[in-house]
Image (spheres, helix red, strand yellow):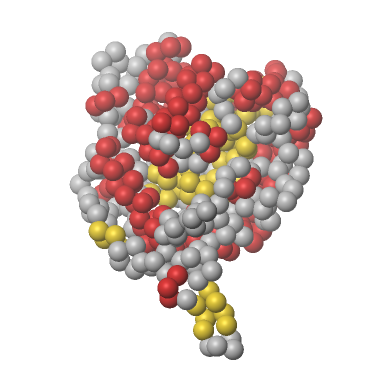
Amino acid sequence: MTTRRLHLNAFLMNTGHHEASWRLPESDPYAHTDLAHYAGLARTAERGTFDSLFLADGPQLWNNLAQRPAGALEPLTLLTALATATEHIGLIATASTSYNSPYNLARKFASLDIISGGRAGWNIVTTAGAEAARNFGLEAEPAHAERYARAAEFLDVSLKLWDSWEDDAIVADKAAGVWGDDGKIHPPRHRGTYFSVAGALNVPRSPQGYPLLVQAGSSEDGKAFAARYAEAVFTAQQTLGDAQAFYADLKSRTARAGRDPGHIKVLPGIVPVLGSTEAEARAAEQLLEDHIVYDHGVGRLESLLQLEPGTLELDAPLPADLPPESAVEGAKSRYTLVVELARRERLTVRQLIGRLGGGRGHLTFAGTPGQVADKIETWFTEGAADGFNIMPAVLPSGLDAFVEHVVPLLRARGLLRTEYGPRRTLRERYGLPRPANQYLTPALV
């Protein structure tokens, strides 16, 4: 049996990742603002010895209200509450470098890391879309390359802030009346293209030093950014071959950036739809697809493809004259994935919407627990993944079924831990070292 172990992340989204999940009799259409709902999911993922759970986010109202539950609790706030409901599982929040400031965000992540005992992670996004831009006084989204340039400086400033306290800056000498050592505080005094940040963080250095740094862009700019900074990468791949190519490319880029390729974990998304038989799983998948309201899907697809409303016809293929990825300023890699999927499988718009309804471009797989375990093992052992972003189509039942039926198979195959063990922090579970403080000069030997 291999000594390499899967990294599993539970991607939690209100009633589930399938856009029609809220319409099932079992679903609570108010679950998206129910703390007890999320706490139950977190404890289920912890029972399955997942490394982490993850919350997506964006600074705009997603979807129209008719389509599916819209609006979401702010993820750092929600994860702080979930830190008290769990003991082991990592807590990864999405936060944008386009519409935040480094000082406030670095403080929030350091606080979550302290409260959780070293379980915080940051999914770093640059936020595409004019809707978000207009919420922050901009008429249009910044250009793709500019968003990544800002993100790089944002990360550099955040790292300086997390290092602005040495680990032993707190002296707590009651007899001498000395609480801390000012000589071990290092204000960044940063002045750059996008940010000017003078003072040290007002939170001590956290248990992990930095939160686990996660990234989800698969464009050329996104992959370059990931190779420089990311320690885990969430990605959407539809085929084993595409996943292997992405995996090899990202590991190679990371090595060329002077980093250990083993210190970046690639986690494709998978939407498992389970049944005791393959026919039962297919029926469950079909039930969800039958509940899709296709008019909603057309509008969303036209927005992704940057087409004028009314361009797409449900029972026709995508237009032949779509712009190339280079002309897209939004979600470049997702644009390419969707167009290639439609072209490769010769899908009509209706069929494409059905395929995207479960995971918005992530791999959807209906089958028995054994078939799902086989798919995961194949990608893991054949150079396509270090683990998976598990995206249940329906919550909580999909996560319950995965933990009850797939997790035992993965454990029996030696692919997944049976218990958390002595490693306490999220970084330790990912096999990552605690980062050294950049302001300290290593002692000469």
The structure residue drawn at horizontal position 30% and vertical position 16%, both measured from the top left corner, is: 319
Query: Depth check: 23 or 317 in front?
Result: 317
Q: Quadrant for residue 15, please give it.
A: top right
| Above or below 239: residue 217 | below
Q: Can you name the residue that lies furthest to the left here?
A: 139
Q: Can you name the residue that lies furthest to the front here?
A: 445
Q: Position of residue 367 (x, y in %)?
A: 67, 22
Q: Position of residue 440 (x, y in %)?
A: 45, 60
Query: Depth check: 262 or 361 in front?
Result: 262
Q: Is residue 66 left or right of residue 276?
A: left
| Above or below 226: residue 155 | below
Query: Depth check: 302 or 157 in front?
Result: 157
Question: Can see residue 412?
Answer: yes
Position of the N terminus, as image quadrant, is: top right
Query: Depth check: 29 or 122 in front?
Result: 122
Q: Position of residue 191 (x, y in %)?
A: 25, 58
Q: Is residue 79 left or right of residue 3?
A: left
Q: Quadrant for residue 414, please give it.
A: top right
| Above or below 357: residue 176 | below
| Above or below 319: residue 439 | below
Q: How many numbered markers are drawn?
A: 0
Q: Position of residue 344 (x, y in %)?
A: 43, 12
Question: Can see residue 296?
Answer: no
The structure residue drawn at horizontal position 31% and vertical position 41%, both measured from the top left corner, is: 148
The structure residue drawn at horizontal position 26% and vertical position 49%, both measured from the top left corner, is: 134
The structure residue drawn at horizontal position 39% and vertical position 66%, both measured from the top left corner, is: 186
